[in-house]
Image: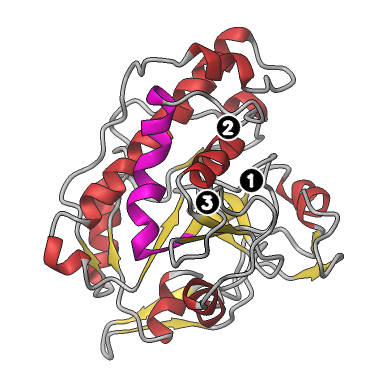
Amino acid sequence: AVLNPLRQAGYEPDIALVLDDSSSTPHVTNDQKVKVDYTHQPAFASFNEAAEALRDMDFNVVTDSPYVQVAEPILNEQYVSQLQQKDGMTDEQHRDRSKNNIRMMESWGRCYDEMTADSQRSMEYDIVVRVREDAGFIEALDVDFLVEKLTENGPEQDDESSSTGKSSNRVVISNGCRQSHGMNDKFAVVSRDAAESYFHSPLRYYYTKPLDPKVISSESFIYYTYLAEGLTVLKPPEIRSVVKVITDENGNTLLFPGEKKTLIHMCRVSIHDESAPNGCTTAWDTTNRDLHQTSEICWPYKIKDPTCETCK
């Protein structure tokens, strides 16, 4: 839903896999929020397996080794205090969630480091796409639409799209819903000029800048950080296909428990069938060295609110 559309649009992606190897201790929050009635596991058994699978499909993976998560990040107590504590979470789990936010932001810096390791090559990138490891898409990305949004002069801004009030090509496009009082942190398309701020400023601001009083979530923290950096943040209603996925013990990709309810509540998107997607499954043609995808729709759906005015 991401790599194939990019190729079809004429782009050849370099891939930085900033992933903690499954052999190390994972730090996740999902199990604290919902109990699942079946075993779920990583899509790949190891970093090397994931990298080789992509290389076998002729993608250039620029990362040579797995990312190691910070074991005990130093907390900003003001952030912990302002972060809205989720129902059912103990104080300890709330602090663990806050630590996971730091790990997420630290890993983003690693993404940029991988992107710029070859300085000459990094100057040739047209666009930058970041996808969280547990994110999926109900349909393939419309790359032409995204590139148009990134490159148009004087992008249309809402009242808070930039603290500088100036239009620029330092643009970030995020999901049009699931914003949690800020912007979705599962996926973004970023102009090259905005990449350093996008990847590095959250962790930098976390430790060196006063918190905006409107920060109550990781999504709101990164949003107000980007506004302070002067980035133009776009959340177009046409983009609301990002979902959280898991892999079951048989290797099937499934929507995370509760996703169907979340999509209708926050995105006004109704999923018709939440079983494992078959229509958009890709297959690699080893003879012709080509990636085939039978459909651009992974989970059949219907838009309930075209303008997304009631989205959250």
**Helix, strand or loop at mark 2:** helix
What amino acid is found at the position of numbered circle 1 in the picture? Phe
Farthest residue to the top: give it.
91
Q: Is residue 186 left or right of 292 when viewed as pictured?
A: right
**Residue 185 picture location, percent across and down:** 54, 46
The residues bearing labels 3 and 1 have C-alpha atoms spaced at a distance of: 38 Å
The residues bearing labels 2 and 1 have C-alpha atoms spaced at a distance of: 9 Å
Please tell me which residue lies in front, 279 or 11: 11
Crowding near pointer 2: few (<14 within 10 Å), some, many (20+)?
few
Crowding near pointer 3: few (<14 within 10 Å), some, many (20+)?
few
Q: Give the mark nearest the N terminus, 2 or 1.
A: 2
Q: Give the mark nearest the N terminus, 3 or 1.
A: 3
Q: Does the segment drawn in magenta span residue 125?
A: no
Q: Measured along the vertical axis of the image, is residue 270 above or below residue 91? A: below
**Residue 112 picture location, percent across and down:** 28, 50
What amino acid is found at the position of numbered circle 3 in the picture? Thr
Residue on which the image places disc 1: 256
Please tell me which residue lies in front, 53 or 131: 131
The residues bearing labels 3 and 2 have C-alpha atoms spaced at a distance of: 36 Å
Q: Give the mark nearest the N terminus, 3 or 2.
A: 2
**Circles 2, 1 touching at the beta carbon (< 8 Å):** yes
Magenta span: 189-208
Please tell me which residue lies in front, 231 or 257: 231
